[in-house]
Image (cartoon, rainbow, N blue to C red):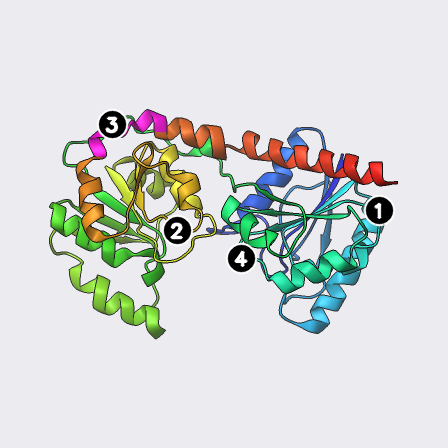
């Protein structure tokens, strides 16, 4: 197949440092090409992703109306030049407007809650069978279905072989918190759970210095650093991530919001590390209660979960990651969707 893939104009593919969707798009392009497909990428100028064809967005901002018009035209031109069998967008739905009445199937992927009005408008504009959607979790897909359309929940993936499996940890292994240190990630819960259970806690991730989240850091997290076994190691690269996760008895990130996906939870499982979080957003899809970790509704339940960690099979956590979030698994789901989209659109003609 010939597949045209897009990413937002603000982000280089792959990212120069840590990145989220930029890494997903880069990995998707690489793995599609590894299967023999031809791939065209439309992304920010300067992107180094090795695609068969590349077009740079002329507009730099997803929020600018002028740039949106320019990028819509640029995408239409890229499609005319590359002649894809399928268009897969990880960028703005508005950029697809000139292509919605065409004969090429389009897959629009969402990494966060969709704007329902925008989705329903696009469906009204699109020719029958042209447009379908994916969410990075069943939770996001379910949100989108309220606007109508064909939705599939397909999770994000990561290079699982880059994460080392730790089959066992020391009896006094610490807990870890690996995420951006902000209120919605529940670092304050993680600290209290660690203190009440007498476990060390390694906190890894960036934090804000100003605004409400800066206040959160200064009042609810920073005062505990260096006390009661609470350690802060800052942002971590891939090597340090392996160490922090692999040496931990569990990753404790008790989210206080509806997480769209959260790749770090799947990465923890790949290291064999159970997850303690909350049953919000996509977490019930990632963590099976008592199997891959525990989903808690209070600090008290978090303390109980820590006591049950010896009952979790770390090898089972790794298998879960391999079966659900390995590149070959997720890319196969996308390829199956492309083929279904092509077949169903062809049947309408």
The main secondary structure of the magenta stretch is helix
* Mark 1–mark 4 distance (CA, rounded to whole Å): 28 Å
Image location of residue 184, percent across then percent down: 35, 60
Which mark, by number, is residue 48? none
Dot 1, how many residues are within 10 Å of its Cα: few (below 14), some (14-19), or many (20+)?
some
Image position of 126 (left or right of 178): right
For mark 4, what is the residue?
113
Is residue 231 in view from this perspective? no
Secondary structure of the residue carrying tag 2 is loop
Counting residues from the N terminus, which is met first, the one under dot 1 or under dot 4?
1
Counting residues from the N terminus, which is met first, the one under dot 4 or under dot 3?
4
* Residue 310 painted magenta: yes
Instruction: Give the magenta part as a residue range.
Output: 309-316
Which mark, by number, is residue 280? 2
Image position of 9 (left or right of 189): right
Image location of residue 33, percent across then percent down: 67, 34
Residue at position x 35%, y 49% in the image: 236
Dot 4, how many residues are within 10 Å of its Cα: few (below 14), some (14-19), or many (20+)?
some
For mark 1, what is the residue?
103
* Residue 284 painted magenta: no
Image position of 137 (left or right of 83): left
Residue at position x 57%, y 40% in the image: 27
Task: Nearest to the eye among marks 4 and 3: give it.
Answer: 4
Q: Quadrant of residue 251?
A: top left
Counting residues from the N terminus, which is met first, the one under dot 1 or under dot 3?
1
């Amino acid at each position: 197949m010939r597949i045209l893939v897009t990413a937002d104009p603000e982000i280089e593919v792959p990212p120069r440092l840590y990145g989220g969707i930029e890494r997903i798009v880069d990995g998707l392009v690489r793995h599609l090409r590894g299967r023999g497909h031809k791939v065209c990428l439309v992304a920010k100028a300067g992107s180094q992703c090795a695609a068969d064809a590349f077009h740079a967005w002329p507009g730099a901002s997803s929020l600018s109306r002028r740039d949106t018009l320019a990028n819509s035209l640029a995408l239409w031109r890229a499609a005319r030049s590359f002649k894809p069998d399928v268009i897969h967008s990880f960028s703005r739905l508005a950029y697809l407007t000139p292509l919605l009445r065409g004969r090429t199937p389009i897959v629009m992927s969402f990494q966060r809650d969709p704007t329902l009005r925008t989705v329903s408008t696009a469906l009204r504009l699109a020719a029958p069978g042209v447009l379908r959607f994916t969410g990075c979790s069943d939770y996001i897909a379910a949100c989108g279905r309220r606007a109508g359309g064909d939705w599939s929940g397909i999770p994000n993936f990561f290079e699982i072989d880059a994460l080392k499996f730790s089959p066992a940890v020391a009896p006094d292994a610490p807990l870890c918190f690996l995420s951006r240190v902000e209120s919605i990630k529940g670092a304050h819960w993680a600290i209290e759970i660690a203190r009440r259970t007498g476990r060390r806690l390694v906190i890894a991730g960036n934090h804000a210095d100003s605004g409400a989240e800066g206040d959160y850091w200064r009042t609810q997290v920073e005062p505990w650093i260096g006390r009661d076994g609470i350690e802060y190691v800052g942002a971590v690269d891939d090597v340090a991530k392996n160490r922090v996760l692999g040496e931990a008895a569990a990753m404790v990130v008790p989210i206080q919001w509806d997480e769209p996906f959260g790749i770090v939870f799947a990465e923890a499982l790949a290291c064999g590390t159970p997850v303690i979080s909350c049953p919000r957003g996509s977490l019930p899809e990632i963590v099976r209660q008592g199997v891959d970790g525990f989903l808690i509704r209070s600090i008290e339940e978090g303390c109980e979960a820590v006591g049950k960690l010896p009952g979790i099979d770390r090898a089972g956590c790794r298998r879960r990651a391999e079966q659900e979030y390995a590149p070959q698994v997720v890319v196969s789901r996308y390829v199956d969707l492309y083929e279904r989209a092509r077949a169903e659109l062809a049947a309408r003609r």
